[in-house]
Amino acid sequence: MISLDVMEISKARAVRILGLGADGSRALPSVARAVVELWTDGAVILIESLCTGDDEPLAARSIRRWCDRDRVDVVFTVGRSGYERADFAPEMTASLLDRALPGVEERMYLEAARGPLDLLFRGKAGMRKGTLVVNLPARPARARVIVRFLGPVVGHAIEKARGSDRDCVPAGAPR
Protein backbone atom coordinates (compact mmCIF):
# COMPACT_ATOMS: atom_id res chain seq x y z
CA MET A 1 0.00 0.00 0.00
CA ILE A 2 1.38 3.39 -1.01
CA SER A 3 0.78 6.29 1.37
CA LEU A 4 0.28 9.74 -0.17
CA ASP A 5 0.12 12.98 1.76
CA VAL A 6 -2.62 15.56 1.05
CA MET A 7 -0.40 17.66 -1.25
CA GLU A 8 0.47 14.62 -3.36
CA ILE A 9 -3.18 13.62 -3.64
CA SER A 10 -4.12 17.08 -4.94
CA LYS A 11 -1.47 16.70 -7.66
CA ALA A 12 -2.39 13.08 -8.46
CA ARG A 13 -3.68 12.07 -11.85
CA ALA A 14 -5.79 8.90 -11.96
CA VAL A 15 -5.33 6.85 -15.12
CA ARG A 16 -7.09 3.60 -16.04
CA ILE A 17 -5.84 1.42 -18.88
CA LEU A 18 -8.12 -1.19 -20.43
CA GLY A 19 -6.57 -4.02 -22.46
CA LEU A 20 -8.79 -5.22 -25.31
CA GLY A 21 -8.08 -8.41 -27.20
CA ALA A 22 -4.93 -10.46 -26.73
CA ASP A 23 -2.64 -7.84 -28.32
CA GLY A 24 -4.03 -5.02 -26.19
CA SER A 25 -3.62 -7.04 -23.02
CA ARG A 26 0.01 -7.78 -23.88
CA ALA A 27 0.67 -4.07 -24.54
CA LEU A 28 -0.65 -2.88 -21.13
CA PRO A 29 2.72 -2.83 -19.29
CA SER A 30 4.36 -0.86 -22.10
CA VAL A 31 1.56 1.73 -22.17
CA ALA A 32 1.64 2.09 -18.37
CA ARG A 33 5.41 2.71 -18.51
CA ALA A 34 4.92 5.29 -21.27
CA VAL A 35 2.37 7.21 -19.20
CA VAL A 36 4.69 7.35 -16.19
CA GLU A 37 7.79 8.19 -18.25
CA LEU A 38 6.23 10.80 -20.49
CA TRP A 39 3.90 12.67 -18.17
CA THR A 40 6.50 14.36 -16.04
CA ASP A 41 4.54 17.48 -15.07
CA GLY A 42 5.03 16.93 -11.35
CA ALA A 43 1.78 15.02 -10.90
CA VAL A 44 1.68 11.69 -9.11
CA ILE A 45 0.34 9.14 -11.60
CA LEU A 46 -2.01 6.53 -10.12
CA ILE A 47 -2.46 3.76 -12.69
CA GLU A 48 -4.79 0.80 -12.60
CA SER A 49 -5.28 -1.60 -15.47
CA LEU A 50 -7.79 -4.26 -16.44
CA CYS A 51 -7.86 -6.80 -19.26
CA THR A 52 -11.30 -7.58 -20.65
CA GLY A 53 -10.13 -9.41 -23.75
CA ASP A 54 -12.90 -9.43 -26.33
CA ASP A 55 -15.73 -8.93 -23.82
CA GLU A 56 -17.22 -5.70 -25.20
CA PRO A 57 -20.04 -5.39 -22.62
CA LEU A 58 -17.53 -5.74 -19.75
CA ALA A 59 -15.25 -3.18 -21.39
CA ALA A 60 -18.12 -0.68 -21.77
CA ARG A 61 -19.25 -1.22 -18.15
CA SER A 62 -15.69 -0.67 -16.93
CA ILE A 63 -15.34 2.60 -18.83
CA ARG A 64 -18.73 3.86 -17.59
CA ARG A 65 -17.82 3.00 -13.98
CA TRP A 66 -14.39 4.65 -14.20
CA CYS A 67 -15.84 7.84 -15.73
CA ASP A 68 -19.18 8.14 -13.93
CA ARG A 69 -18.50 6.78 -10.45
CA ASP A 70 -14.74 6.85 -9.96
CA ARG A 71 -14.25 10.16 -11.86
CA VAL A 72 -10.77 9.21 -13.05
CA ASP A 73 -8.83 11.70 -15.16
CA VAL A 74 -7.96 9.53 -18.17
CA VAL A 75 -9.09 6.19 -19.57
CA PHE A 76 -7.01 4.56 -22.29
CA THR A 77 -8.18 1.51 -24.17
CA VAL A 78 -5.39 -0.49 -25.81
CA GLY A 79 -6.13 -2.65 -28.82
CA ARG A 80 -9.14 -3.54 -30.93
CA SER A 81 -9.06 -0.17 -32.74
CA GLY A 82 -8.01 -1.36 -36.17
CA TYR A 83 -9.74 -2.46 -39.33
CA GLU A 84 -10.60 -6.11 -38.60
CA ARG A 85 -14.17 -7.30 -37.96
CA ALA A 86 -13.37 -8.06 -34.32
CA ASP A 87 -12.13 -4.49 -33.68
CA PHE A 88 -14.91 -2.93 -31.62
CA ALA A 89 -13.17 -0.21 -29.57
CA PRO A 90 -13.98 2.83 -31.78
CA GLU A 91 -17.71 2.12 -32.01
CA MET A 92 -17.96 1.22 -28.32
CA THR A 93 -16.05 4.33 -27.28
CA ALA A 94 -18.05 6.63 -29.57
CA SER A 95 -21.28 5.37 -27.99
CA LEU A 96 -19.99 6.23 -24.50
CA LEU A 97 -18.65 9.75 -25.14
CA ASP A 98 -20.48 12.97 -24.23
CA ARG A 99 -18.24 14.94 -26.59
CA ALA A 100 -15.81 13.81 -29.27
CA LEU A 101 -12.46 15.52 -29.69
CA PRO A 102 -11.98 15.36 -33.49
CA GLY A 103 -8.80 17.47 -33.40
CA VAL A 104 -7.16 14.98 -31.06
CA GLU A 105 -8.37 12.08 -33.22
CA GLU A 106 -6.98 13.63 -36.39
CA ARG A 107 -3.61 14.27 -34.77
CA MET A 108 -3.54 10.71 -33.36
CA TYR A 109 -4.03 9.31 -36.85
CA LEU A 110 -1.35 11.46 -38.44
CA GLU A 111 1.19 11.51 -35.60
CA ALA A 112 1.26 7.78 -35.08
CA ALA A 113 1.29 6.73 -38.74
CA ARG A 114 4.62 5.25 -39.82
CA GLY A 115 3.51 2.93 -42.60
CA PRO A 116 0.53 2.36 -44.91
CA LEU A 117 -1.23 -0.08 -42.55
CA ASP A 118 -0.98 2.45 -39.71
CA LEU A 119 -3.50 4.57 -41.60
CA LEU A 120 -6.15 1.93 -40.83
CA PHE A 121 -6.12 2.84 -37.11
CA ARG A 122 -9.64 4.03 -36.18
CA GLY A 123 -9.23 5.18 -32.58
CA LYS A 124 -11.62 7.66 -30.97
CA ALA A 125 -10.99 10.35 -28.36
CA GLY A 126 -13.39 12.42 -26.30
CA MET A 127 -14.79 13.31 -22.93
CA ARG A 128 -17.26 11.49 -20.71
CA LYS A 129 -18.31 13.33 -17.55
CA GLY A 130 -14.98 15.09 -17.16
CA THR A 131 -12.83 12.06 -18.05
CA LEU A 132 -10.68 11.98 -21.17
CA VAL A 133 -11.20 8.66 -23.00
CA VAL A 134 -8.76 7.66 -25.75
CA ASN A 135 -8.35 4.52 -27.86
CA LEU A 136 -4.74 3.48 -28.39
CA PRO A 137 -3.39 0.97 -30.88
CA ALA A 138 -2.06 -2.33 -29.54
CA ARG A 139 1.39 -1.76 -30.99
CA PRO A 140 3.38 -0.23 -28.11
CA ALA A 141 5.54 2.08 -30.24
CA ARG A 142 2.46 3.71 -31.82
CA ALA A 143 0.67 3.91 -28.47
CA ARG A 144 3.69 5.71 -26.94
CA VAL A 145 3.64 8.31 -29.72
CA ILE A 146 -0.01 9.12 -28.93
CA VAL A 147 0.59 9.20 -25.16
CA ARG A 148 3.54 11.55 -25.72
CA PHE A 149 1.37 13.86 -27.85
CA LEU A 150 -1.42 13.91 -25.25
CA GLY A 151 0.84 14.60 -22.24
CA PRO A 152 0.80 18.42 -22.46
CA VAL A 153 -2.95 18.75 -23.13
CA VAL A 154 -4.44 16.25 -20.68
CA GLY A 155 -4.53 18.50 -17.62
CA HIS A 156 -6.09 21.40 -19.51
CA ALA A 157 -8.70 19.19 -21.21
CA ILE A 158 -9.78 17.75 -17.87
CA GLU A 159 -9.94 21.20 -16.22
CA LYS A 160 -12.15 22.56 -19.01
CA ALA A 161 -14.42 19.49 -19.01
CA ARG A 162 -14.91 19.86 -15.27
CA GLY A 163 -15.96 23.51 -15.53
CA SER A 164 -12.79 25.58 -15.21
CA ASP A 165 -13.12 29.10 -16.56
CA ARG A 166 -9.34 29.54 -16.78
CA ASP A 167 -8.31 31.08 -20.10
CA CYS A 168 -6.98 28.62 -22.67
CA VAL A 169 -4.28 31.05 -23.80
CA PRO A 170 -1.84 32.22 -21.10
CA ALA A 171 -1.72 35.96 -20.48
CA GLY A 172 0.73 37.66 -22.80
CA ALA A 173 0.80 34.82 -25.32
CA PRO A 174 -0.03 35.67 -28.95
CA ARG A 175 -3.61 34.80 -29.83
Image (tube, grey):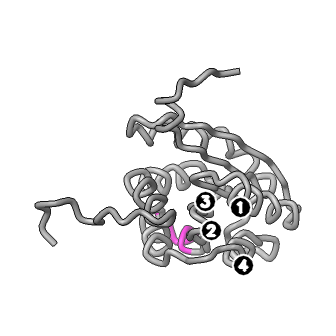
Say which quadrant the N terminus sits in: top right
Q: Percent from the top left, x then y, of residue 20?
A: 77, 57
Q: What amino acid is labelled 3 in the image?
A: Leu
Residue 36, position as x, y percentages in the image: 51, 37
- Mark 1 neighbour density, 10 Å: few (under 14) some (14–19) many (20 or more): some
Query: Would you say the residues marked 2 and 1 are in contact, meaning their CB atoms lie under 8 Å apart?
Result: yes
- Labels 3 and 1 touching (C-beta < 8 A): no
Which residue is identified by label 1?
68
The residue labelled by disc 2 is 128
Q: Which of marks 4 and 1 is nearer the N terminus?
A: 1
- The secondary element bearing badge 4 is classed as helix
The residue pinned by badge 3 equals 136
* Measured Cα–Cα span from mark 4 to mark 1: 14 Å
Q: What element carries label 1?
A: helix
Mark 2 residue crowding within 10 angstroms, few (<14) / some (14–19) / many (20+): many
Residue 62 occupies quadrant = bottom right
Q: Is residue 95 above or below residue 7?
A: below
Q: Looking at the image, tell me whether mark 3 or mark 4 is earlier in sequence order.
A: 4
Q: Nearer the viewer, mark 4 or mark 1?
A: 1
Q: Are marks 3 and 2 in contact (CB under 8 Å)?
A: no
User: Which badge, 3 or 2, comes first in the chain's sequence?
Assistant: 2
Mark closer to the observer (3, 1): 1
Residue closer to the observer: 160 or 77: 160
Q: Left or right? Give the position of 107 relative to 136.
A: left
Q: Label 1 sits on what residue type? A: Asp
Residue at (78%, 46%) from the top-left corner?
50
Region rendered in magenta: 114-119
